[in-house]
Amino acid sequence: MLTLIIATRNRHKVGEIRAVLGDPHRYLTLADFPAAPAVVEDGATFADNARKKATEIATWLGQPGVDCPADPVWVLADDSGLEVDALDGAPGVHSARFAAGEAGVEGNAPDVANNARLLRLLARVPAAQRTARFRCVIALARVSATATDDVTLHEGSCEGRILEESRGTAGFGYDPLFQPDGYPHTFAELGESVKNGISHRARALAALAASGTLRTS
């Protein structure tokens, strides 16, 4: 059985990834490897951050003395965020720390603070100009006893717009403000079964599955 080590401790991401890729694989996360190094996501793009996370964790797992499952083992890392056209693509790679950056503090900000800042910045932007998209890049790196194989990248996006107020209680992040094209509801109203079929991460995962990169030998 192939083992996927998902480079996150975010349970929402893990659930979505498993829902899309199914159960043929064994799934582990960084919670199963408490000594794993913290990766600084300082890349200029989603691809930069996803690649850095995948390679650093895969390299660490391949070191002698690390209790890693038997081959084949892959590290799956992703970086994703919201791009708002009226804000020239912001918050982008800073999506999780959007409000923290405004306050001049380190680390991620609470979802409610990020959403509040987004609404303030778009307060005078008419509905027709509130177009946006969620974008996700997934990086996959294989762990071996001696080296990390080349990284493959897989991208997905979901177009929509930003509403003037939050709607829905499900989801996380900017989900209550984002209404995907073709749907009358926000990500936070659609429910996981629908969201997992159309989200940016779901589409990136579908591209990964279709690539044939994941294999058990």
Image (cartoon, rainbow, N blue to C red):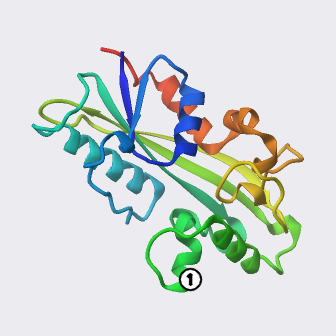
Looking at this view, is 77 or 151 the one in front?
77
Q: Residue at x 47, y 25 (%)?
A: 211
Q: Residue at x 86, y 65 (%)?
A: 128
Q: Which residue is mark 1?
A: 102
| Picture residue at 10% right of the left edge, 37% below the top | 64
Under circle 1, the secondary element is: helix
- Image location (x, y in percent) of residue 47: 43, 52
Q: Residue at x 69, y 66 (%)?
A: 85
- Around disc 1, counting alpha carbons within 10 Å, would you say few (fewer than 14), some (14 to 19), or many (20 or more)? few
Is 213 displayed left or right of 17 in the figure? left
Q: Is residue 137 left or right of residue 157?
A: left
Q: Residue 128, can we see it? A: yes
Give the image location of residue 212, x and y in percent: 44, 21
Vertically, is 213 above or below 113? above
Work out whether 88 lies above or below 149: below
Q: Is residue 180 visible?
A: no
Q: Amino acid at mark 1?
A: Glu
Q: Quadrant of the N terminus?
A: top left
User: Total label count?
Assistant: 1
